[in-house]
Image (cartoon, rainbow, N blue to C red):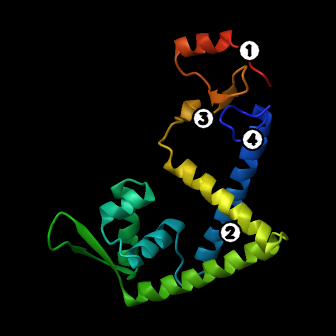
Amino acid sequence: MTSPSGNGVSSYSDAVVTGKLLIRLGSRIHRLQVEVLERLSTPLSIRQYRILVRVDQGISSLSLQAEQARRQRSTVSKSADSLVRQGLLTRTEAVEDRRSVVLALTPAGLALLSEARSASEQLAVWLVQAAEISPETLAILADQLYEATEAIVDTPNVLKPNTAIMATSGSGQIDPLPTTRSQKKQRSARPVRR
């Protein structure tokens, strides 16, 4: 049976297996990217790399950086400060609003960003070759994963830590486990398929 949302997941256990595979894939690719960035002439964290990329794309405001990264401004500010100390970015007050900060790449930052992009491209090529799947099939899969990622990223923080464990109602629909007493009573009255 397909879930009511029409996503093709036939059961809770299928969703768990598929979800765990996606988490595993994401974790492995993340680890590989971390390793690549750590081997640069000046090691970078993924967060630092993304800040450099966004500054190069013209996103020079700390507030916009934080918004794009979906992080607190203070978190992005700490990473930016580290890049400034390393001589990769400059940080100045905005002319129109002295409370705002403008980030800019230094020549060293631009050179390191070029090195990081090249290393990331090499990783991307290796991933495609190592997958042992035709480039066409992999491109289709990548497009579908991109769409799924965008849907997940664009979804507000629906699941709180205590509801991250999922269960399924008798209809086969996947829903969060209850967190309040009344929700728990309602939940215990419904049959749960495993």
Binning the other alpha carbons within 10 Å of mark 1 as few (below 14), some (14 to 19) or many (20 upward) gives few
* Residue 96, horizontal then vertical, whole percent: 14, 70
The Cα atoms of the two marked residues, 3 and 2, are separated by: 26 Å
Name the mark nearer the viewer: 2 or 1.
Answer: 1
Residue under label 3: 164
- Label 4 is placed on what type of residue? Gly
- Residue 27 vs 168, above or below: the answer is below
First in residue order: circle 4 vs circle 1: 4
Label 2 element class: helix
Mark 2 neighbour class, 10 Å CA radius: few under 14, some 14 to 19, many 20 or more: some
**Secondary structure type for disc 1:** loop
- x and y, in percent, of residue 108 in the image: 42, 88
Q: Position of residue 121 (x, y in %)?
A: 63, 80
* Mark 4 and mark 1: Cα distance apart in space: 22 Å
Residue on which the image places disc 2? 32
Distance from the alpha carbon under mark 2 to that under mark 4:
30 Å
